[in-house]
Image (cartoon, rainbow, N blue to C red):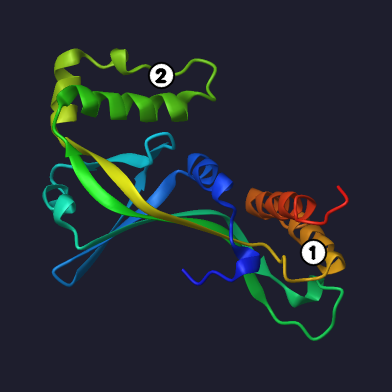
Amino acid sequence: MYLPQHFKMPETELYDFIEAWSFGTLITTQSGVLSADLLPFLVDASQGCLYCHLARANPRAGSLMQADDLLVSFIGPHGYISPSWYQSPGLVPTWNYSSVQVRGKAVALGDPDRARWVVDALRQKHEAPFEKPWLLQEVPEPALRTMLDAIVCFRIEITSLKGKAKLSQNRTDADQLAVIEGLQALEGGEGRDLAESMEARRLNRPGSAN
C-alpha cells in the first residue's frame, strides 16, 4: 500500500474500520499462484486476529495455512472526484477512498464448537439491526451439523495492519467543502457515505477549530 503520511489512518482507528467495513478480500500467494476470495470477517481487536470461513469444497480451504503470503483488504466508501467541484483551478480528477490492509497467518479451527461460534458470531453481527433477528437455533440440529461440516473456519493472526484514508486532506478547506457538497448532490448512498467520511476527517484533523 502506497501510504503518504497525510493519508495515513491513525492506528486507533484501524480495528474500528474493519468492524464497520468487514466484508473483505482475502488474497494469498502459494507456489507462485495468486488467489482471492470475498468473505465476511469478524475482528477481535483484543486478540489481534480475524475470523472467517471457507467452503470445504474450495481448494484453498485445505491449503490456506500454508500460504506464502496472506493479505486481507477492507475498503470503505469510495468514489470519483470531479475537478469541476474544486474551487481551485487547474486540478485533475482523482478517486477518494479509505482502506485497511491486514497481513497475517491462518490457523484452521478444527473444533466443531469453534466453527459454530464463528458462524453464530457472524449471524449476531449482521442480524443485530433487525427487529426480530434470525437465530441459528431455527435450523434443525442435524441440518446445521451438515452445513457446519461443509465449511472450514479460520483464525487469521494479524502480523501487520495499515490504513489509508485518501479523503482530499491535501486540498484546501474550500476545496474539501466543495467536494463534500458535490458528493452529497449525487444520487445513491455511496456519495453521501463518502461525504460523511470526508467531513469527519476534515473536522478531526490536527489544528481544526471544530
Q: Residues within 10 Å of mark 2 (few under 14, many from 20)?
A: some
Q: Which residue is mark 2?
A: 134
x 38%, y 41%: residue: 48
Mark number, residue 17: none
Q: Quadrant of residue 86?
A: bottom right
Q: Quadrant of residue 120?
A: top left
Earlier along the polypeptide chain: callout 1 or callout 2? Answer: 2
What percent of the width, then of the height, locates residue 55? 19, 42
Residue 22 in the figure: left or right of residue 90: left
x 75%, y 55%: residue: 205
The disc labelled 1 sits on which kind of residue? Gln
Q: Which residue is mark 1?
A: 176
The disc labelled 2 sits on which kind of residue? Trp
Q: Residues within 10 Å of mark 1 (few under 14, many from 20)?
A: many
Quick check: 21 above or below 123?
below
- The kind of secondary structure element at disc 1 is helix
- The kind of secondary structure element at disc 2 is loop
